[in-house]
Amino acid sequence: MGALLGLLLGVGLLLLRRGGRRTAPRRALVADWRRRRTEMLRQAGIEGTTAAQLLAIQLLAGLLAATVVLGLTRSAGIACWFGLVGAAAPAGLVRRIRRRRVVDLRELWPDAVDNLASGVRAGLSLPEALAGLGERGPEPMRPAFAAFGADHRASGRVDASLDRLKERLADPVADRVVETVRLAREVGGTDLGVVLRALSAFLREDARTRAELEARQSWTVNGARLAVSAPWLVLLLLATQPTTLDAYDSRGGILVLAVGGLACVLAYRLMVRIGRLPAERRVLG
């Protein structure tokens, strides 16, 4: 009996030890999820909203969608699936806003770099040239560069102000520009203007190429979105008939909804992954 109790005690201690080891990876996953969500909101230009608030909005949207569909169809199974769609809608909308803003900024960055190079050629210091973009730069970028100017005037620490500027912009091109400015300030040199003009030409050519590819790709993506959403819109219309409700409230109907929803999600994600253009990553952020 004593040996059995000792064995059980040893197994319990071993399980507690392994459970404690999983706490750190779980916290790391949560922190990584929060970081990616926060960066997505910044890239979309949505200020004052945190990752937790976005999650709360998703839960409320899903609950609202499920309630509305349940009131229209009186089917719990159909309401649950449309509730999942409603919960995913806010994050999808933020991603769509982010993509549109990234495309807009991609076309504006060459002008911003040209403006920065002109300021450097005119004899301005690098922090002054960056702060000047808050008044003379492209309109969507002005708040971030104006905040940089205010940070620099208040603290006088250029490196910290540059780090906060990268956090506000949350853009790969901004990372390259900021790190170029940081390196030029630390080591000096007279080739900064040449480097900035070369960077501007490269960004302009890259934006032109991507715009052509995205224009050719857009009709395929829109067709895939229509193909995925059409069956569910038809289902919502058919759900007004009592015979349809009886069919989809059964176990077989719920299984059909689950398989159909999973197939739609997998097909759409596969299409997006195959047709996705290579995107720059923030390796310096």
Image (cartoon, rainbow, N blue to C red):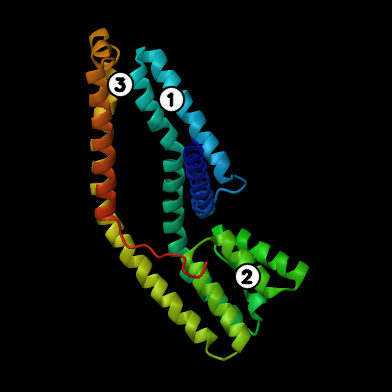
At label 3, counting other C-alpha atoms closer than 10 Å, the crowd grade (few under 14, some 14-19, many 20 or more) is: some
Per the image, the residue denoted by label 3 is 236
Residue 65 got which mark?
1
Q: Position of residue 122 (x, y in %)?
A: 62, 83
Residue drawn at (55%, 61%) of the image: 169
Lower position in the chain sequence, tag 3 or tag 2? 2
Q: Position of residue 223 (x, y in %)?
A: 23, 42
At label 2, counting other C-alpha atoms closer than 10 Å, the crowd grade (few under 14, some 14-19, many 20 or more) is: many
Work out how far the residue at label 2 is from the one at label 1, CA to CA, in angstroms: 43 Å
Per the image, the residue denoted by label 2 is 162
**Residue 137 against residue 238 in the figure, above or below:** below
Q: Position of residue 175 (x, y in %)?
A: 52, 69
Viewer-proximal residue among 43 and 214: 43
Image-quadrant location for residue 141: bottom right
Residue 75 got which mark?
none
Residue drawn at (37%, 66%) of the image: 207
For badge 2, the amino acid type reads Leu
Q: Secondary structure beneath disc 1?
A: helix
**Residue 190 against residue 62 in the figure, above or below:** below
Q: Position of residue 49 (x, y in %)?
A: 59, 44
Residue at the top extreme? 242
Lower position in the chain sequence, tag 2 or tag 1? 1
At label 1, counting other C-alpha atoms closer than 10 Å, the crowd grade (few under 14, some 14-19, many 20 or more) is: many
